[in-house]
Image (cartoon, coloured by chain):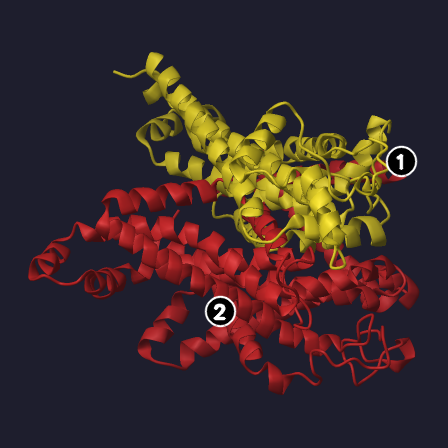
């Protein structure tokens, strides 16, 4: 057990180190390149005095390394800085009311919305994909298996927005069963919220199910040639029981791994899907901020996405270590 | 409520039909093993498949021949999808048949082993390549030509608001959709291809270099790639494009996007090239070349590269799909390929609101789906071909 703890501790440390370096990369990409974002805020007709005032106000005149650690310190305390777009321009002409929208205030509710969407998607996609994978492995090379293979291959290859519009077309426009716009607000009833989230969640489900299902099928089929499965079959156990009781537990490591990796993939998918459905999540905020070059928000969103991605990859790594009996019980 | 009741009743009927099917099968074949050992789930699956088939045929016949046009509009896309599916299957079949008759002995053998999906993939890739190369000659109008008639309905039927000059209609500012789709093949596919090519030159070169030199070069490059790969590709691309936007605009931004995507994708190529290169570097003939006193460039380009072509080519197909989808997503989000270039992702974004008219005028809402479908079709085709190639090379039979 000791060696497992040691490996996990190593992975955790490595993950934290990666996160730290990634934060440096994100900060450097935005700040160390030439060009000045004070001028970007004010546009072309900026007077030198106004630019200087903004630079001082945003702390852009300090050394980049110092700024990085100030930013990092703020991030660790939950302070992500002030949004450029929502900065109170009154402050730059001397009439400062002192009220600013911070990036954290902007992100917090949207972060919760995105987590809700990801949660609903995972709750639908994971059981669905694993069941489909088991069925495909059970009836391998049948019509069902081939149809599932072609359908999943097509849904992996389609861009997210194509799937989203096809679903909108059939489930929202031609058959008005689900709302095509996800206007979610605070204090909404859970059932209503779920109904509005369902279509984006279904789109994301289509995107991630394919990989998980194919991996589940491959992992189980891989094991079916092993002697102990042969033995179970010769004992006369029903095929379904052979797979669920004997093959599945040993195939769990790759399946868990691919589930975690696909949840990490959700992070990328969420951006496009939120834009299609106008879902007020962090992905939409990210794209909007990219378009208007709201640097602090872009930086913060990027950091959150990268952190979630690293965290899920780390989880996949650790879970596959924990689910491997050879590592758990070393000789 | 009645919808749910219908659904439940249909399920019960199908379950019963499955049971009857198995029972009759057992009696009729005198307990043949197929029916005797059939679990109920399988019988249910057959019944479900038959029910779905009957439903599809019934809906198709109704929409095509029985219902009046206003009600049949609801099934317009269903009918189009069935036509498309049948057409695609027939085209792939004929193409495979042709490949089995015409050509050299090697290519005929290849076509004989080819499943229908792979034949379809090859056919689609050929058509796209043809469209991309001869876009200028094929397109009836220029990609940026703006006509006076905006929002012409696809179909070319004047009674429905179409125009024979614009078979697929015009978009919201009056550009011919068919021409833009054809030019999109050149722009979108071409840009994705160039990006993948740059990524392979950079990533492959550095990967082989790391594999040959080892030591600190390998360490530095590998760790840098580790860090860059820790950020999701689309997110990192969006971040870098935000930065690039401070200096460039329009076509400049398109070029910046190509370079950014090439940089991000080269990290993935680097990993593979390094791993493949590592296996080749330990071979005896590399040792011999080193002892002969060959230069580094000779070892990388004349010894390692020829032996690494096969795995790199298979990877090229998959990388191309990935880059193509990411660039389309970026364009859809409005930060990828910039006007004046016609591009499928941007077309989907511009025309996406047409979808809402599907219930009354299905032809109108077909336009954005055509562009999105063009993207999906190519990636599906490439994936079918790569899937078949992997299946062939791994020798998997199960």
Between residue B371 and residue B174, name the one nearer to us.
B174
Query: Outermost residue, front direction?
Result: A49
Query: Outermost residue, bottom direction?
Result: B137
Q: Are marks 1 and 2 on the same chain?
A: yes
Question: Which chain wears yellow?
Answer: A
What is the spatial separation of the Cα atoms under label 1 and label 2, in whole angstroms? 47 Å
**Helix, strand or loop status at disc 2:** helix
For label 2, the crowd category at 10 Å Cα-Cα, with few meaning under 14, some 14 to 19 and many 20 or more, is some
In the rendered structure, the colour chosen for chain B is red
Residue A62: percent from the left, percent from the top? Answer: 59, 38
In the image, residue B384 sits, relative to residue A53, either above or below, namely: below
Identify the disc placed on residue B122. Answer: 2
Identify the disc placed on residue A240. Answer: none
Report whether residue B9 is seen. Answer: no
Residue B202: percent from the left, percent from the top? Answer: 39, 59
Residue name at image x 68 percent, y 31 percent: A115
């Amino acid at each position: 057990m000791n060696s497992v703890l040691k490996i996990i501790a190593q992975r955790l440390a490595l993950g934290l180190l990666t996160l730290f370096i990634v934060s440096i990369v994100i900060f450097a990409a935005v700040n160390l390149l030439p060009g000045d974002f004070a001028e970007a805020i004010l546009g072309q007709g900026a007077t030198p005095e106004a630019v200087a005032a903004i630079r001082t106000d945003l702390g852009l005149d300090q050394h980049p390394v110092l700024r990085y650690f100030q930013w990092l310190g703020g991030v660790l305390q939950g302070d992500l800085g002030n949004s450029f777009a929502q900065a109170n321009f009154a402050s730059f002409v001397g009439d400062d009311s002192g009220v600013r929208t911070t990036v954290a205030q902007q992100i917090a509710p949207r972060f919760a919305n995105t987590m809700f969407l990801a949660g609903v998607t995972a709750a639908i996609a994971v059981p669905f994909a694993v069941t489909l994978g088991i069925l495909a492995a059970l009836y391998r090379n049948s019509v069902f298996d081939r149809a599932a293979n072609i359908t999943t291959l097509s849904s992996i290859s389609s861009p997210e927005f194509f799937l989203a519009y096809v679903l909108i077309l059939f489930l929202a426009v031609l058959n008005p069963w689900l709302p095509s716009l996800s206007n979610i607000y605070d204090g909404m009833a859970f059932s209503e919220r779920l109904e509005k989230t369902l279509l984006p969640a279904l789109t994301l489900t289509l995107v991630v199910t394919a990989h998980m299902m194919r991996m589940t099928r491959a992992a189980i089929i891989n094991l079916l040639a092993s002697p102990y499965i042969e033995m179970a079959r010769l004992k006369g156990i029903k095929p379904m029981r052979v797979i669920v009781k004997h093959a599945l537990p040993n195939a769990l490591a790759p399946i868990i791994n691919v589930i975690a990796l696909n949840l990490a993939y959700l992070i990328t998918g969420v951006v496009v899907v939120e834009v299609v459905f106008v879902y007020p999540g962090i992905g939409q905020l990210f794209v909007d901020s990219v378009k208007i070059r709201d640097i602090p928000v872009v930086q913060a969103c990027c950091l959150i996405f990268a952190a979630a991605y690293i965290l899920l990859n780390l989880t996949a790594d650790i879970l596959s270590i924990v689910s491997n009996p050879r590592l758990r019980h070393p000789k | 409520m009645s919808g749910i009741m219908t659904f439940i009743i249909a399920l019960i009927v199908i379950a019963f039909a499955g049971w009857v099917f198995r029972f009759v099968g057992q009696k009729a074949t005198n307990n043949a093993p197929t029916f005797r050992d059939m679990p109920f789930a399988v019988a249910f699956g057959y019944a479900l498949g038959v029910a779905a088939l009957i439903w599809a045929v019934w809906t198709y016949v109704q929409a095509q021949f029985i219902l009046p046009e206003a009600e049949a509009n609801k099934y317009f896309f269903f009918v189009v999808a069935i036509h498309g599916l049948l057409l695609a299957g027939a085209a792939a079949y004929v193409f495979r048949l042709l490949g089995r008759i015409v050509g050299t002995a090697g290519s005929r053998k290849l076509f004989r082993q080819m499943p229908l999906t792979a034949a379809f993939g090859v056919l689609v890739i050929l058509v796209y390549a043809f469209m991309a190369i001869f876009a200028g000659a094929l397109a009836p109008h220029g990609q940026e030509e703006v006509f006076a008639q905006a929002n012409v309905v696809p179909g070319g039927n004047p009674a429905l608001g179409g125009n024979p000059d614009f078979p697929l209609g015009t978009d919201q500012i009056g550009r011919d959709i068919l021409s833009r789709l054809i030019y999109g093949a050149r722009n979108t596919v071409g840009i994705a291809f160039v990006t993948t090519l740059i990524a392979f030159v950079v990533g492959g070169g550095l990967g082989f270099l790391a594999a040959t030199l080892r030591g600190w070069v390998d360490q530095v490059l590998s760790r840098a790639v580790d860090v860059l790969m820790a950020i999701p590709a689309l997110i990192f691309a969006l971040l870098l494009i935000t930065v690039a936007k401070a200096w460039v605009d329009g076509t400049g931004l398109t070029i910046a996007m190509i370079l950014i995507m090439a940089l991000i994708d080269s990290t993935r190529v680097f990993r593979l090239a390094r791993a493949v290169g590592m296996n080749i570097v330990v071979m005896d003939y590399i040792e011999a070349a080193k002892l002969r006193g060959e230069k580094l460039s000779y070892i990388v380009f004349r010894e390692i590269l020829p032996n690494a072509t096969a795995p790199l080519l298979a990877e090229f197909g998959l990388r191309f799909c990935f880059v193509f989808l990411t660039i389309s997503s970026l364009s859809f989000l409005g930060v990828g390929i910039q006007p004046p270039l016609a591009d499928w992702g941007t077309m989907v974004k511009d025309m996406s609101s047409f979808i809402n008219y599907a219930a009354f005028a299905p032809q109108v809402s077909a336009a954005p789906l055509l562009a999105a479908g063009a993207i999906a079709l190519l990636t599906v085709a490439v994936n079918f071909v790569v899937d078949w190639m992997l299946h062939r090379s791994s020798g998997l039979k199960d």
